[in-house]
Amino acid sequence: MAVLVLGGAGYIGSHMVKRLVEKNAEVVVVDSLVTGHRDAVDPKAKFYEVDIRDKAALGEVFNQENISQVVHFAAFSIVPESVAQPLKYFDNNTGGMITLLEVMKEHDVKQIVFSSTAATYGNPVQIPIKETDPQRPINPYGESKLMMEKIMDWSDQADGIKWVALRYFNVAGAAEDGTIGEDHHPETHLVPIILQAAAGQRPYIEMFGNDYQTPDGFNVRDYVHVLDLVDAHILALKYLADGQPSNQFNLGSATGFSVKEMVEAARQATGVDIEAKVGPRRPGDPDILIADSSKARDILHWEPKYDNVQDIIKTAWHWTQSHPNGYNNR
């Protein structure tokens, strides 16, 4: 029986595939390669270049492979882009989920772990954020993911498809051996952008907005190492395999760092005096997002190993130094 990883050529998905292969799991990867990298996929996994919205092609993968569980990372995730192009996000993210669930239903596959997001909460009513807090997205990306959660819930009620939604915040870091890491074009995530400045690939890091309602004026997020994150997905697969009900879990470090603090942590981790400048706010960015992940720790028995943000940055720096041009180095 195989685990299907949708979006398995992407940043988080490729680390998930690598971890599953290390655990001797049979892994099937589906990725359109619109943003993913073929070289990021572990050669021991079986790969199909398929768009999640292509029902016939996706169904053929299910026909050929003995799939028992699905992990879904195949979504667009850039907040400002979602504000500018909302239909793109509802088409790929929400529409893609509908197609996937139809194919799962047709092939009697009943378990899915879904890469959701803290963006479903919008501006939180309390910090840290709990799973029971209101979900009021303030951008199309968060709205599309919330719709995906709701669609899965209705599919569970109608068709018995059990699901776990993992709502996480900022993901960073890379595989400890430096073989895979974060490589987006264009890059929009904070840590790799900071490290590009450290590596001399950009002249400075631009910090978007210094007038947020936070102690230093810069928006605050918590950061989870990508390996800790994929371990939570593996625990969620086990949770479903054990016959547990559908559920939602926040994943986070429970400690928030402002953009300014992250730049300083990167200076310490890399030994480079990274230049930083203040730019205008980006649309759709909440002031503070920090997760209460106690539910995941209690029920999934999730125990993150990276609790120091400098250690997280050091693994990303290892990847950046060994792959200055990303996967184009290979």
Image: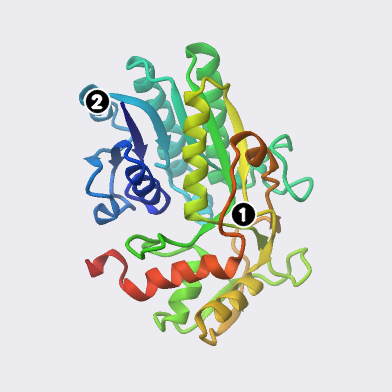
Residue sitting nearer the eye, 282 or 187: 187
Location of residue 263 in the rendering, given as x and y in whole percent from the top left corner = 59, 75
Q: Which mark is residue 98?
A: none
Look at the numbered discs 1 and 2 and tell me whether their residues touch, using CB distance below 8 Å.
no
In the picture, the quarter occupied by the N terminus is top left
Q: CA distance from mark 1 to mark 2?
A: 35 Å
Q: Quadrant of residue 49?
A: top left
Q: Which residue sits at x=59%, y=51%?
A: 169
Relative vertical location of residue 198 with respect to residue 169 in this rendering, above or below: below
Residue assigned mark 1: 284
Relative vertical location of residue 88 with respect to residue 271 in this rendering, above or below: above
Location of residue 108 in the rendering, given as x and y in whole percent from the top left corner = 36, 15
Q: Amino acid at mark 1?
A: Gly
In the picture, the quarter occupied by the C terminus is bottom left
Disc 1 packing (10 Å; few <14; some 14–19; many ≥20): many
Q: Quadrant of residue 222?
A: bottom right
Residue assigned mark 2: 56
Q: Which residue sits at x=52%, y=42%?
A: 232
Q: Is residue 108 left or right of residue 255?
A: left
**Element class at badge 2:** helix
